[in-house]
Amino acid sequence: MTKRKAGVARRVLAAAALLGATALGSAATIGQAAAQEGIYVPLFTYRTGPFAGSGIPIADGMRDYLTMLNERDGGIGGVKIVLDECETGYDTKKGLECYDAVKGKKPVVVNPWSTGITLPLIPKASVDKIPILSMAYGLSASARGDIFPWVFNPPDTYWDGLGIILRYIGQQEGGLEKLKGKKIGYIYFDGGFGKEPIPLFEQLAKDFGFDLKLYPVAPGDMQNQSSQWLSVRRDRPDFMVMYGWGAMNPTAIKEAAKINYPMEKFVSIWWPGEDDIRGTDGAKGFKMINWHGIGTDYPALKDIQKFVVDKGLSKANKDKVGELLYNRGVYNSLLIAEGIAQAQKITGKKAVDGADVRRGLENLNLDEARLKELGLAGFTGTLKLTCDNHNGHRPAFIQQWDGAKWVKITDPIEPMPDKVKPLLDAAAQDYAEKNPGWPKRSEPCDKAS
Amino acid sequence: MNILYALFVDPWVQMGQAPDLLVQTLWEGLVSGVLYALIALGFVLIFKASGVFNFAQGIMVVFSALTLVGLHEMGVPAFLALGLAVAVMFVLAVAVERVVLRPLVNQPDIILFMATFGITYVLIGLGELIFGGNPKRMIADELYLPKGAIDLKILGGFVSLQKIDIAAAVIAAVMIAALAFFFQKTRIGRALRAVADSHKAALSVGISLNQIWAIVWFTAGIVALVTGIMWGARSEVSFSLQVIALKALPVLILGGFTSVPGAIVGGLIIGIGEKLGEFYWGPLVGGGIESWLAYGIALAFLLFRPQGLFGEKIIERI
């Protein structure tokens, strides 16, 4: 082999290395785009790594809704939104690096998109004056606005999600009291997110007299779940509940089908998407919670297609726009945009900061009229946050996979506030006590909230 | 007393009471073990030939499978995509030999080991750049891989054998047999064994180290592709598959880094051991022991055979 050929080969691999490094470092490069003008909204996303299957559609939905507001309306209240994606890979360490990278640019809100990243950011929020929006994830107890004034987790906590699932299971059995003596299995991601509802689950098992079986799935074994499902086959739970993420969801659905577990008795929290289930033999009948619409049959979604997708400004494939997790991202950005709009309304300022948006989120009021005005009538239920209630604890419905698409099969089901609230209050108090120097709320409440 | 019963008596009672579940657990362990063995085989091949612990073997599994399904998504027919994926693994092997191994020859092993970290991150970046980070469905139907299950009504219950798992076991067995033949009976195979014994001695009889390294990396690439197809068909092709490759580490500890039979037997012991452990003893501690049990099994073996089951006992006189 000649030296020249060897040199060429070396250059080819060097170029490949450069491309690879570019891919890995793309987030950092994007992150250089500091907020010079406008309202700076960093988006913590994960388009790479083991959880990219869930992360990509959410990132696309978040980005496209805010881009649509920029393109259609010139931003919010006439001020452009400066978007800045930071790649976390669903890795807590990288998430914290993202936070450190963006906090100097005065973000008006941070969306960690990981319970693991949210938890260490909670103590920082009040110090840095940057509100955290952990939409339907994160620390359930942070719904208490009087103790966590800088954290928002609407429209439901993981505990609410569990309450809704159990109510639904109760409906199937003819009442919650009929759960006595039943066996309910819980297969979960063995990390912060999956462990979050276990204290409530154990309490509810005592209260309603059912037997709770736990099936943890280690992050490294997301695609290797045959042991857990063999245990399910042995234990024969009457119902299975799942809190999964990333590659865990499609694998669990496949394994459940493999052991012929009745899919109509398998109910998930709100995270599986179409790609997790499409094409899986035996998956028909699988159920999950949801609180928003699927598809593009809403004026705001049509505007996303018109102003973003058709103009080539979206990173999403056209056929993915309107899918479940894409619309989840849209919902997340709806909350961001409304928080900013409310902040502008309350303060009279155009260029709002984090402290203003915290107030905006606390006064968020998505009623029917407002949803219609935003082009999202019928997309989701109403949501009103207050000074004390940073979550809403809203009802959600159950949808079922019919083999090709999700079909809504129930009306919205209320969570279990009577069961959840005492535990949530205790957990919030416990958090404050276990963190010495946890500040008492000093932020005044606005009249409206 | 209850704990002792739960530890030492109850699992055996359960095995006796539900023998169909025991057989099912053994089958699941066997299939996992075969796939672990395949991954471990990739490590062993490269370690034998170059003394390098190839950290990139896991991402090679992902990258090769991603190339296959990614090309198919771009409109390339399935079997042509398979051929092209093989070609890509060949190009990768040559590139690694030229750009990484050759310039680093005679460097300490740790340098070569660190270089494989570099290869890992390059392949992650390239894979995401070309094919995107989203998980993809393995084109099992297009490759005529079987689907569905054979349900055997035996032992008072049933044992379900997924056809894809049977195919995985058969393909892995054929592949291992082919590799054994290749290494034992062909000129290149004998040359590779010579390189494994001594680089200097091999060089002195005219064996080209560079050629052998490229062949070995290519072979490891083929093993990675087969592993990726099989794991991908059981779940999906995503970057989380590279984490599963770490399951090969206890297999290597157990089987020895230089033994092909060790990789196979080690894979089976780890696969079956972790499934039995998780299923019968896992509930005692709330489950989820599978992720570390494999290491426990490997370390327990090491107490008695520090060189691994089939590793060579090295005695150096000083």
Image: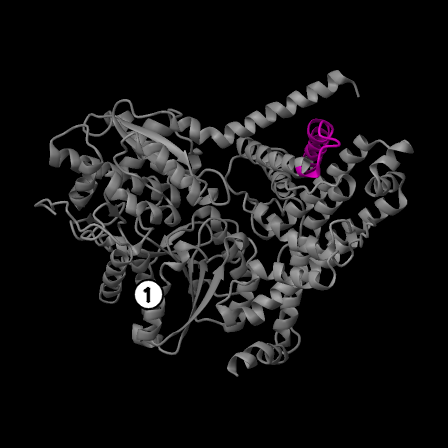
Identify the residue shown where x is 62% and y is 62%: B296
Q: Nearer the viewer, residue A319 or A97?
A: A97
Q: Amino acid at mark 1?
A: Leu
Identify the residue shown where x is 88% and y is 37%: B201
Q: In the image, is residue A24 above or below residue A266?
A: above
Q: Examine the rendering and report whether any part of residue A2 can be seen.
A: yes
Let me know if residue A110 is in the magenta part: no
* Left or right, residue B237 beside residue B83: left
Residue B37, horizontal then vertical, whole percent: 70, 53
Q: Nearer the viewer, residue B204 or A391?
A: B204
Highlighted magenta segment, given as a residue range: B82-110
The residue tagged 1 is A200
* Left or right, residue B88 beside residue B189: left
Residue placed furthest toward the right: B205
Q: Secondary structure at mark 1?
A: helix
Residue A307, horizontal then vertical, whole percent: 32, 27
Quarter assignment of residue A43:
top left
Q: How many marks?
A: 1
Residue placed furthest toward the bottom: B1
Residue B261, horizontal then vertical, whole percent: 78, 55
Identify the residue shown where x is 71% and y is 56%: B169
Residue A381, horizontal then vertical, whole percent: 24, 50
Q: In the image, is residue A255 above or below residue A333?
A: below
Quarter assignment of residue B137:
top right
Q: In the image, is residue A175 above or below residue B302?
A: below
Label 1 crowd bin: few (<14), some (14–19), many (20+), radius 10 Å: some
> Which secondary structure dominates the residues rendered in magenta?
helix
